[in-house]
Amino acid sequence: MEQEEIVFVDGRETVLTTALHVRCDGGNGPLGHPIEYMTLERGGEVTCKYCGRRYLHVSHPDAAAARHAAARRAA
């Protein structure tokens, strides 16, 4: 089962995911943007060309740092 976790790193929305195929619609319903389908490789990352949302595969080297930064900010 695919899992996603949304964290904010330096004010930028970052999605940590186990999926290799992701879709982004801007997240604002009718105020979002056209759906963009993107493919990740294991350990890879991709950025939405419309809204700049960053998608990181959970095995990407920056994924643990992103979780740590989000947890530190929430505390």
Image (cartoon, rainbow, N blue to C red):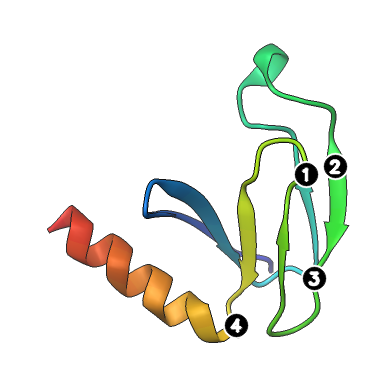
Whichever of labels 4 and 3 marks the residue nearer the N terminus, that label is 3
Most foreground residue, 18 or 74: 74
Label 1 SS: loop
Q: Are marks 1 and 2 in contact (CB under 8 Å)?
A: yes
Residue at the disc numbered 2: 36
Q: Residues within 10 Å of mark 4 (few under 14, many from 20)?
A: some
Distance from disc 2 to disc 4, alpha carbons, whole Å, reads: 21 Å
Badge 2 amino acid:
Glu
Distance from disc 3 to disc 1, alpha carbons, whole Å, reads: 14 Å
Residue at the disc numbered 4: 60
Badge 1 amino acid:
Lys
Up/down of 13 relative to 32, above or below:
below
Whichever of labels 2 and 4 marks the residue nearer the N terminus, that label is 2
Residue 72: x, y in percent?
19, 65
Q: Quadrant of residue 21?
A: bottom right
Up/down of 36 relative to 34, above or below:
below
Residue at the disc numbered 1: 49
Badge 4 amino acid:
His
- Residue occupying image coordinates x 74% and y 84%: 42
Distance from disc 1 to disc 2, alpha carbons, whole Å, reads: 8 Å
Number of numbered discs visible in the structure rendering: 4
Residue 27: x, y in percent?
62, 31
User: Does residue 17 appear to the left or right of 69 in the view shown?
Assistant: right
Up/down of 27 relative to 60, above or below:
above
Distance from disc 4 to disc 3, alpha carbons, whole Å, reads: 10 Å
Residue 37: x, y in percent?
87, 49
Label 4 SS: loop
Residue lying at the far top of the rendered structure: 30
Distance from disc 4 to disc 1, alpha carbons, whole Å, reads: 20 Å
Residue at the disc numbered 3: 40
